[in-house]
Amino acid sequence: MWNYEKRLQYPVNIKNSNAKAARFIITQFGGPDGELAASMRYLSQRYTMPYKEVCGVLTDIGSEVPVLSRRGYKPAWGQDSGHPIDSMGIEVSKLHFSFAGRKDKRKCEVIPMMDKEKTTARPVLSGKWINIMLIFCTEHIEPDIGTSVSR
Amino acid sequence: MTNKSREQLMCIITEASFAIDDCKLYLDTHPCDREALDYYQTYRKIRKEAMKDYRDCYGPLSAYDVADANVWTWINAPWPWEGAC
């Protein structure tokens, strides 16, 4: 059902990257109350709607959430301003890439760290296509929102 | 061929597409609004031409519309998250 175009819905020009803002924003994306979960609910509920208008709205808005959330993401590896994080706001300590089918066959894993110190719980996410969690940075958000982030 | 730069064409495409995204949500709940339908058709036309120009001059924007070449140009740079940031 879905097609995509190789462009951003909205242009992005980051002048000052802000990892705290990025961390907060990305927590809105994932998790049970996040945008992505809402999108999945809309896309699941459209099948039983009695009115075509509602089917249309649920499909269109459900489809736009991943678009809106992905715009402006950029990799921030190695920057002094912060650590890369996944969609739950958990810092990711390592990211490698899986090149399925390529001759070098480098093995890849994403290992999210549960907190700043090394812990024993290290779930490994891997697979043929690894969803790269990038950090969303924006110049429009005030930098002192870190106090409201619980992690 | 077009005399517009890559950035100019991409700007036109972005703006026309956003207008359509917005209009589409309105038309979902107001399917008979003639003014909105005309608005949609205007931007559809602008977008279609800009997309065609972009594809011809700068590369494919959709995987269903990749011009014939000796290599698979779809994977060429830039991907949307590269560049301006």
Image (spheres, helix red, strand yellow):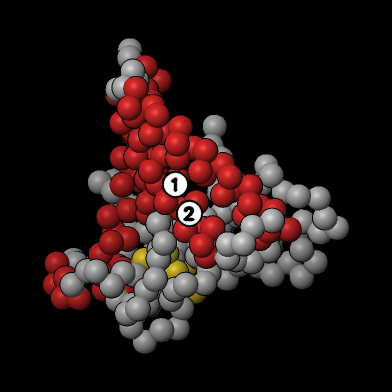
SS category of the residue bearing label 1 = helix
The dot on residue A57 is: none
Q: Quadrant of residue A49?
A: top left
Residue A11: x %, y % from top left: 41, 62
> What residue appears at the point 50 percent right and 51 percent down from the top-left corner?
B13
Q: Splitting the image into 4 quarters, where does residue A38 fall?
A: top left
Reading the image, the residue beneath label 2 is B12
Q: Is residue A40 visible?
A: no
Q: Is residue B77 visible?
A: yes
Q: Given the image, on which type of amino acid does mark 2 rest?
A: Ile
How packed mark 1 is, by other alpha carbons closer than 10 Å (few <14, some 14-19, many 20 or more), is: many
Structural distance between the alpha carbons of marks 1 and 2: 6 Å
Q: Do badges 1 and 2 share one subunit?
A: yes
Residue B19 horizontal/vertical position (percent): 38, 43
Up the image or down, A139 lies above or below B66; here it is: below
Give me the residue at 44% from left, 73% from top.
B85
Of the pair A140 and A75, the residue shown nearer to us: A140
